[in-house]
Image (cartoon, rainbow, N blue to C red):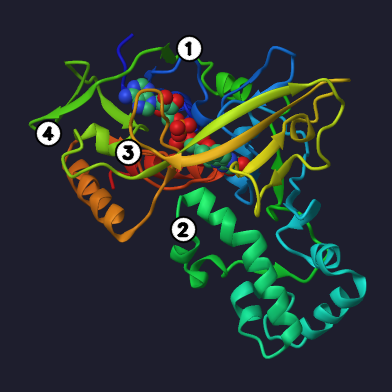
């Protein structure tokens, strides 16, 4: 079967592209370097039978009805609503910071006074930390400074590897404190995890007689005279590339900076480790957060639970490291735009996905991006 399209990568971007193309009658070849499909959303059962997310906890959430109904063809969602706490001075304080968090941190009497002071503010019930810090009210100033220090400052330094003095309050403290009882982490209309896991969902997306998936194949994509070659052979049809764009072009304009993550998994012989699926360590520890998977997958595993600690560090490009979060600066934007300009001259090449577009995308945004790229291609845009 000759392929009309070759897709590099079997993550969510690659799987969405392959499926949509197959649905419209195309033969698709998918090449994936890992021994499994799913990319960053890959999950599997660990040695104790607990379903874990190997590349960090993933909670699906969207307000995009088209994306949601596309994915619903391949899975049901388990209805989980994500709630997160920060561990501050031995207490679990809900984040995003809301009325309950204020009462937890300051007690009910002082908390109530803060809330009634905040009612006078223009943007109430959502007030940015920066506004609170700049407020005339001493109580609101105290609240703003508390949230900035205990939720953002150290956490951001860990996440992005910066000294506290390098953190610009104007950027980090734009996030609002919610003066409501809503303690959901995401407020989208649809949220949850695929009932049988992400890997299963992606496998089903790729199940089609028109799709051939080759795992464990690192595609060497090269461009010569504006023609695309995969492992030395001219590509058949068009190519959708979901890998690293700087790599595609031999790093000729320099490397795009990323943060990578180290994951430390542990299985414990207990029913429950922590009261929330995810707890952010915002003022202590070297890791950024601990996730207890069964609290989000809603899997019943009596007497056993698996947790994971996440450590963030600079991506160096060494063997085995995965580039996770793009480090967006003026310089990296500039480098990426040079690669993008090059890619636009190459007939039949489409970039899509978190690595190829050098963007932090949530899962729904990746699916949406692929839908838009393919629809523009069909219209010849
Ligand atoms: C720690 C973490 C937590 C996250 N949590 C959430 C969340 O809770 N909710 C949410 O909506 N989103 C979340 N995301 C974002 C989500 O992971 C991404 O939006 C999505 O997985 C991106 O899919 P992708 O296909 O673009 O990239 P990837 O999943 O990285 O897939 C790219 C694939 O291409 C393969 N590949 C690359 N180059 C080659 C090559 N040359 N040859 C063969 N194969 C190649 C890679 O091996 C990989 O499998 C999170 C991301 C991270 C890092």
Q: Which residue is mark 2?
A: 163
Quadrant of residue 50 within the rendered picture: top right
Residue 225 at x, y = what percent? 7, 31
Is residue 263 shown left or right of residue 106? left
Is residue 254 shown left or right of residue 27? left
Q: Which residue is mark 4?
A: 226
Q: Earlier in the sequence, mark 1 or mark 4?
A: 1
Quadrant of residue 137 within the rendered picture: bottom right
Residue drawn at x 32%, y 40% is 377
Residue drawn at x 85%, y 74% is 111
As measured in the structure, the alpha-carbon distance from the residue carrying label 1 to the one carrying label 4 is 31 Å
Residues at badges 2 and 3 in contact (C-beta under 8 Å)?
no
Q: Residue furthest right?
A: 109
| Quadrant of the frame with the N terminus | top left
As measured in the structure, the alpha-carbon distance from the residue carrying label 3 to the one carrying label 1 is 25 Å
Residues at badges 4 and 3 in contact (C-beta under 8 Å)?
no
Q: Which residue is mark 1?
A: 209
Residue drawn at x 46%, y 50% is 161
156 is higher (above) or lower (below) than 146: above
Q: Nearer the viewer, mark 4 or mark 2?
A: 2
- The one nearer the camera, 69 or 24, is 69
Q: Which residue is mark 3?
A: 351
Q: Nearer the viewer, mark 1 or mark 2?
A: 2
Crowding at dot 3, Cα within 10 Å, few <14 / some 14-19 / many 20+, comes out as many
Quadrant of residue 52 within the rendered picture: top right
Residue 301 at x, y = what percent? 84, 20
Q: Nearer the viewer, mark 2 or mark 3?
A: 2
Answer yes or no: disc 4 within 8 Å of ligand 1: no
Residues at badges 3 and 1 in contact (C-beta under 8 Å)?
no
17 is higher (above) or lower (below) than 371: above
- What element does badge 2 sit on? loop
């Amino acid at each position: 079967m000759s392929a009309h399209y070759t897709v590099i990568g079997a993550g969510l971007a690659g799987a969405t592209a392959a499926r949509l193309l197959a649905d419209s009658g195309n033969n698709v070849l998918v090449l994936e370097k890992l021994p499994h499909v799913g990319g960053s959303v890959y999950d599997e059962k660990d040695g104790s039978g607990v379903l874990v997310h190997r590349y960090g906890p993933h909670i699906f959430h969207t307000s995009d009805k088209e994306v949601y109904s596309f994915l619903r063809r391949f899975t049901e969602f388990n209805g989980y609503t994500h709630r997160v706490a920060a561990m501050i001075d031995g207490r679990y304080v809900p984040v995003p910071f809301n009325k309950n968090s204020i009462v937890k941190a300051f007690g009910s009497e002082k908390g109530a006074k803060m809330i009634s002071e905040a009612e006078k503010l223009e943007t109430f019930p959502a007030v940015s930390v920066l506004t609170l810090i700049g407020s005339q009210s001493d109580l609101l100033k105290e609240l703003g400074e508390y949230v900035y220090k205990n939720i953002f400052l150290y956490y951001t330094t860990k996440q992005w590897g910066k000294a506290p003095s390098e953190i610009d309050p104007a950027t980090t403290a734009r996030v609002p404190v919610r003066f409501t009882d809503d303690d959901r982490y995401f407020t989208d209309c649809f949220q949850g995890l695929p009932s049988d896991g992400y890997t299963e969902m992606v496998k089903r997306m790729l199940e089609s007689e028109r799709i051939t998936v080759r795992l464990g194949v690192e595609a060497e994509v090269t461009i010569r005279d504006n023609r695309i070659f995969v492992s030395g052979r001219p590509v058949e049809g068009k190519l959708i590339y979901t890998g690293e764009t700087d790599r595609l072009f031999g790093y000729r304009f320099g490397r795009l900076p990323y943060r990578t993550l180290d994951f430390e998994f542990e299985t414990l012989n207990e029913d429950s480790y922590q009261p929330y699926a995810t707890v952010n360590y915002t003022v202590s520890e070297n890791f950024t957060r601990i996730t207890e998977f069964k609290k989000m997958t809603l899997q019943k595993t009596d007497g056993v639970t698996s947790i994971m600690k996440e450590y963030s560090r600079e991506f160096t490009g060494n063997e085995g490291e995965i580039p996770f979060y793009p480090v967006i600066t003026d310089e990296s934007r500039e480098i990426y735009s040079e690669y993008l300009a090059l890619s636009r001259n190459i007939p039949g090449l489409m970039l899509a996905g978190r690595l190829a577009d050098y963007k932090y995308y949530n899962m729904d945004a990746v699916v949406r991006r692929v839908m838009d790229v393919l629809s523009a291609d069909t219209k010849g845009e």
